[in-house]
Amino acid sequence: MSLKDKIIISKLPEHIAVIMDGNGRWAREKGYERIFGHQNGVKAVRNVVEAAGDLGLKYLTLFAFSKENWCRPRSEIDALMDLMATTINSETETLIKNNIRLLIIGDRVRLPSRINGELNEVTEATKNNTGLTLVIALSYSSRWEITRATAKICEDIKAGKLKEINEEIFNSYLATSGIPDPELLIRTSGEFRISNFLLWQIAYAEMYFTKTLWPDFGKEDFYEAIISFQNRERRFGKTGEQSK
Ligand code: IPE
Ligand code: IPE
Ligand code: MG
């Protein structure tokens, strides 16, 4: 029996975010170059996107490349960018066929222009799709996003376009504007940290950490994380009795 059958569809989170970590270690353990791990990580992405779509999940956000990742060796960055370009090309048809809408969040000025061009084409081609919204965080960091939001708010206040700030308004200035907060955050590879990912948005997310390295993360692992989520009591500051 697949773990999928244990998932209560009516209690599915609306939004799951994933820190896809461990590609490099996966490859090194096998005696390969780190890029081999990234290549195999793409297969895991395909599996999880498919599983999310089949379950009827509304939003899936994947952390693919952080702003801090620009500090990696040039050769790894170049190989990752090449892999991204090939993946966007090879996956566009599948996204369209499966009614998936693609969104990109992150500081895109540092991305090579060919990647930006291709990303613009895919986001445009899938913008009216009504199934899963797949958000890819690329060249993303939460502090960048929060700082940029604050700067934009200041500009709008100065220009007289904005009179007050509250949580809802602040939220609308983030890159994730219009997207509900993730209820579940998964991180693979046994690291217990957030690495500058969605700091504002995960205020009340349930955390799920697994030792599994990203290229080994399959549909069953994804279902297991959702089942763990469904077995938790989310209290939002209230008492257990109030939350029942
Ligand atoms: C995650 O795997 C992918 C990216 C950060 C691009 P890593 O490349 O971080 O793999 P490890 O953590 O070194 O094993
Ligand atoms: C976080 O992984 C970024 C992505 C998964 C894209 P890292 O491997 O870069 O995180 P740290 O540096 O170990 O915290
Ligand atoms: Mg890592």
Image (cartoon, rainbow, N blue to C red):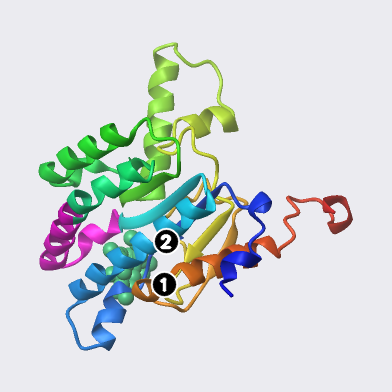
Q: Would residue 105 be seen by someone viewing this image from the given angle?
A: no
What is the three-letter code of the residue carrying label 1?
A: Phe
Question: Which residue is under mark 2?
Answer: 48
What is the three-letter code of the residue carrying label 2?
A: Val
Specify whether residue 80 is painted magenta: yes
Q: Secondary structure at mark 1?
A: loop
Magenta stretch, residue numbers: 66-86
Q: CA distance from mark 2 to mark 1?
A: 8 Å
Apparent side of residue 76 relative to residue 159 in the rendered image (left or right): left
User: Where, quadrant-wise, is the N terminus in this rendering?
Assistant: bottom right
User: Where, quadrant-wise, is the C terminus in this rendering?
Assistant: bottom right
Q: Secondary structure at mark 2?
A: helix
Q: Nearer the viewer, residue 2 or 113?
A: 2
Q: Nearer the viewer, residue 206 or 6?
A: 6
Q: Nearer the viewer, residue 194 or 84?
A: 84
Q: Ligand 3 falls in which quarter? A: bottom left
Specify whether residue 81 is painted magenta: yes
Residue 132 numbered mark, or none: none
Residue lying at 39% horizontally and 39% vertically, measured from the top left: 147
Residue 33 position (above or below residue 106):
below
Residue 217 numbered mark, or none: 1
